[in-house]
Amino acid sequence: MSDIHKPCACSPDKGVSRRSFLRTSTVLASGVAALAASLAPLRELTDYTSIEQFMQKYYKEMTPQEMEKVLERITREVEQHYKIRPHVKDYKPMDGVEFVYCLNLTRCIGCRKCVHACVAENNQSQNPEIQYIRVLKLPHGSLDMEKGDHNYAPSSVPEKGFFYMPVQCQQCKNPPCVKVCPVKATWQESDGITVVDYDWCIGCRYCEAACPYFARRFNFTKPSIPKERLNPNMSYLGNRPRKQGVMEKCHFCIQRTRAGKYPACLEVCPTGARKFGNILDPESEVSYILRTKRVFIQLKEELGTSPRFFYYFDV
Amino acid sequence: MMRACKNYLTFLWRCTRIAFVGDWRYYAWLGLLSLFCLVGLNAYAKQIVHGLVVTGMSDQVSWGVYIANFTFLVGVAAAAVMLVIPVYIYGNEELHDLVIFGELLAVAAIIMCLAFVMVDLGRPDRFWHLIPGIGQFNFPGSMLSWDVIVLNGYLLMNVHICGYLLYCRYDGRRPAKWFYIPFVFLAIVWAVSIHTVTAFLYVGLGGRPFWNSAIVGPRFLASAFTAGPALIILAMQVVRWITADSPGGGVAPPPSGTPAPEAGARRPATLEDLELLASHLPQFASVPAEIRQSILMDAVVLDVAPGDALLRQGEAGNEVFFVLEGRVVVKREEKGRFRITRSVGPGEQFGETSALTKTPRAATAIAEEPACLLRLPADSLSKLMQIPQMNKIITWRMTERLMITDRALMILRSIVQVSMLINVFLLVNEIFKEFYSPTAHVASSQYLYFGLHGYHALVPWIWVAIAFNLVAMFLLVLPLSRSLKYLNVACVLAIVGIWIEKGMGLVVPGFIPTPLGEIVEYSPSLNETLVCLGIWAFGILCYTVLLRMAIPILQGTLSKATEGHGDFYHRSTETPTLGIPDVKTAHSR
């Protein structure tokens, strides 16, 4: 028998012998040391989750006072990090409003100004780059997205023989992303905007797999925004800076549209291809377009997602 | 109540303690696995700090090898049921001995599944948002919330069934049927559900045509019932190998075949001897006086010394032995190696199988300590067996053994065989549907099997997987695989093939091309791979420790009866059942 087979240190009938005690403690000590060594990278962790953040309640269950406190915390954090005092507000949906977006494919020239205006307005990470709008360059006569070029970079647009189709969150009436979220961290608001509670998302990315429009973006690492480019006008469900490991997406510029302004992508569009408004108001521009224009495309209509984003043509 | 608690705590304590006892091979194996675990933990710590950017995943391919492993392992866990169904529904005896091993494998697999989901989360600190009651649980809307319920439920069920059966075996009592049989049947349905729900995670996504197909669920089950039992076939042979040759108190059985010398002192049995037996075996009290008288006629009491052989494997014999005092160990020889199949104490019997079936002795029995035995001829045993209580207890104790027979492995082979045929058949169905009418939805399959627009990272993998599966299928169908050597080759090929096909071959192409037609390829990063290796090592570590606890309990060497015995027992019970011990000691005496 090798001596391992001798009664171990914890043998009931033998006392703890000096030798086995030494051996056990050496094994234990080296085990603890190895464990500590393997966890060493955690020393680089800078962004701890505070108790306050850890315990934060679900958005829909917070009282106005609790929300006040959370907004204060966000203000404090942003100020600490960017040395700019932001105005953080929790913009609520307005009664009798349902937002709809219309995009005129005849007019879009593929300049991607909307993409960049969106990044600036919504405090998207610039390294790594996160963009909510993807513009596809498609050959005339086809809507087959597999033929689309995502990375076109000519010296000037538009190019002959092609048309351009910007795709962003389609704000579906029947959103697959909301259905699959295991923790209800994303939902549809009464004005039709699908939002994400960045403080509730667990980062499983199931919604990203479920989205048929490639509209969701994940913070694979800590987002970085240059201080001078931070937009200080922020909303809780909208453009406040996000953390590592959570999902984000287009929210129709909630901090603008719920305050009666147009989304940033619309405002910057040089050709007037983008139209936005309240579909419940018969006098609105989008109501007029949906009444009078003849051809509309709802992307991937066959999936039954029923987008609030309509593509149309001047015919 | 207090005593029951104390007894249970002693059981847990002894199980925990035995997990840390073994020979140098056992320690080296644990050390190696722990090393991999720590390397994995280190990689995970890096991922915590820097985020999932350290993986190969992107917005385009947002799930990778973590979820691929998760999917594969849910199948392994579900496959434990392929042992349970034959045993509990069709009453198969051969597989009965393996059920616990299958369920422990399910426990280890589910632990790995949960770990793989955990490392895939971007915000593990918000895990509590998933807990029903305190978090926000999107049930029944999200298939992921279903998965949380079915996986944790399956884990609890299997822990309960194994824990209860092992504890009863330890305690030397018959498990109460109502306390575990309902769970066994629930677990059968549940096992199907864990894998179906996992398939539905993918099937439910209308925007991903590669997954949005009704055949995914059945294919998952078919491949799980191939890979799972294949893994059990391999694992059982490893268990059989490492549990053999154990020194068992330093007593080596003599070569089988030679008749046992008449050992020890012998005298005719008296009524007092039967009273002594009844004190250890309460069921014996139900034996009427006239039967007692009649069996006394041919009954012999033997007093034997440690090391005396009472019966030998291979020889003919039709007597049954009841232990009155001391302990007897029963060892079986397989290919020149010896394994303890049971350890028998006062009130328990051995040799009954040969007595009842008139077959040669299946194992050798050796006294482990000075023992006193009651020997009865076969017809006396038959008389006893006519009494219902005695019949019940004797039949039940017959099943208490550690046996991994080739026949059990062959039953598993036929399960793997049929499942593999169904698996390949379903694959053919899917390929036909995708390519015969190539709609726009064929893009992902095109990418997977042939490459798309010059991108073909997965092409070599999937063809290797298909080749492995086909070779495995042919091997399994041919009589060749009745030999363990070829069966093992087939099992390894099937496991690797299915791991590729169902992991990387299912998860990744679902994302390529993206819904907007973009192609971004995926390959796991080094850090990601290390995390995966760490979790696999952790799972194997769990399984090793669970086996380390379960095997001596199944052998009867770790039981309430052996509690508090001196060094002798420490040696014989808690020496390496895992890890091949001193061959020298085993054969030199």
Image: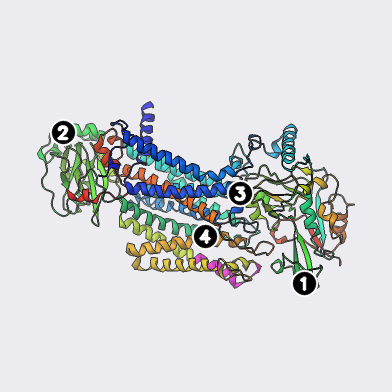
Looking at the image, residue B465 lies above or below residue B116 = below
Question: Where does label 1 land, which residue?
Answer: A141
Both on one chain, marks 1 and 3? no
Question: Where does label 2 land, which residue?
Answer: B273
Q: Nearer the viewer, mark 3 or mark 4?
A: 3
Q: Residue at x 82, y 45 (%)?
A: A258
Image location of residue A230, percent across then percent down: 77, 47
Image location of residue B57, percent across then percent down: 60, 56
Q: Is residue A236 left or right of residue B372?
A: right
Does the magenta run of residues contain B427?
yes
Does the magenta run of residues contain A266?
no
Question: Where does label 4 land, which residue?
Answer: B502
Tag 4, which secondary structure?
helix
Instruction: Tell me which chain the residue with mark 4 is part of.
Output: B
**Residue stretch in magenta:** B425-440
Q: Is residue B340 left or right of residue B466?
A: left
Q: Residue at x 25, y 36 (%)?
A: B567
Both on one chain, marks 3 and 4? yes
Image location of residue B353, percent across then percent down: 23, 48
From mark 2 to mark 1, how far is it between C-alphas? 100 Å
Which quarter of the image is occupied by the C terminus of chain A? bottom right
Q: Looking at numbered disc 3 in the image, what kind of residue is underneath it? A: His
Q: How many marks?
A: 4
Q: Looking at numbered disc 1 in the image, what kind of residue is underneath it? A: Gly
Question: Where does label 3 land, which residue?
Answer: B50
